[in-house]
Amino acid sequence: MSDYAFRIVNVFAEQRLGGNPLAVFENGVDLSSETMQALALQFNLSETTFILPSTVASAHVRIFTPTFEMPFAGHPTLGTAHVARAAGLAGDEVTLEMAVGIVPVIADGDRWTLEAKPPRTREVAASRAELAAMLRLAPSDLGETPLWVDTGSEQMVVPLASVDAVRRCSPEAGLLSRHGTATLADGTSRSMAYVWAMAGSDRVLCRFFFLKHGAVVEDPGTGSACANLGGWLLATSAKRPLAFSLSQGEAVGRPCHLQLAVDGSGRIFVSGRVIELAGGTLTL
């Protein structure tokens, strides 16, 4: 029998029971991939991470949803960096080795900032009418050009015309599967859509939907999508530098607050506060 220490943290949280929860195992060196996957299913959070030794960074990190491993995700990156510092693996400057490469993360107290990978973009094949039907909206509710954007995890970014349209979104599962599916490098596929609208001169309201076991699920706070919004802004020639405050999670009762910045050279940064909620050991 072996004990494994873990911590539960809330990321993008401005209150203890807000944000997007994450389980972080402090030392996964003796755990197989199959056991990591089983533990992620056991916790049944959007992601669970496992810290491993690294020869090129502060830590090597593997990220699992309850059903598959991910090469990168935003809130697991910030939350794991917070735990790595707490475990004495680094100070306020942390580098995390992931499948997408080394991701730098820095802290200002309990507010963490990651630098995303340079974006890749491609056109969305679905028409505006098809996307509107997928989201159960009118075509007039759609904003500027939707794009697939990849700063570490490819997602469909769909700008909407108003915050009211964001709040009215209710994706239809079959159409989300048809129009919102991306094939990953390992041959698996994911279906998702990130919708957003300006809620002021520097504020954004956003939501992230994905399919899980054939049903539409909403994520409370999605750092990778925040980074991809930065990629969308670069692809559509938005004036920079820029800084936006994003609100996500209101529809699922888990308010999340994310900060997006794009500097003059086009580097993309995502920030959020991390609150440690609990910790313990799990015996296998």
Image (tube, rainbow, N blue to C red):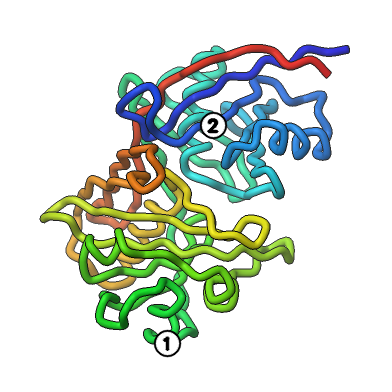
> Residues under labels 1 and 2: Cα distance?
36 Å
Where residue 22 appears, x then y in whole percent? 54, 31
Indicate the amino acid at tag 2.
Leu
Residue 123 in the figure: left or right of residue 239: right
Say which residue appears at 36% left-offset and 30% top-offset: 13
Nearer the N terminus, badge 1 or badge 2? 2
Say which residue appears at 80% left-offset and 39% top-offset: 33
Residue 239 in the figure: left or right of residue 127: left
Where residue 226 appears, x then y in whole percent? 37, 52
Residue 22 tag number: 2
Does the image show residue 43? yes
Residue 238: image quadrant is bottom left
Residue 229 in the image: above or below residue 58: below
* Residue that label 1 marks: 127
SS at mark 2?
Answer: strand
Does the image show residue 120? no
Front position in the image: 136 or 67: 136
Say which residue appears at 71% left-offset and 38% top-offset: 41
SS at mark 1?
Answer: loop
Where residue 161 appears, x then y in whole percent? 22, 71
Residue 266: image quadrant is bottom left
Quadrant of image for the C terminus: top right
Residue 66 tag number: none
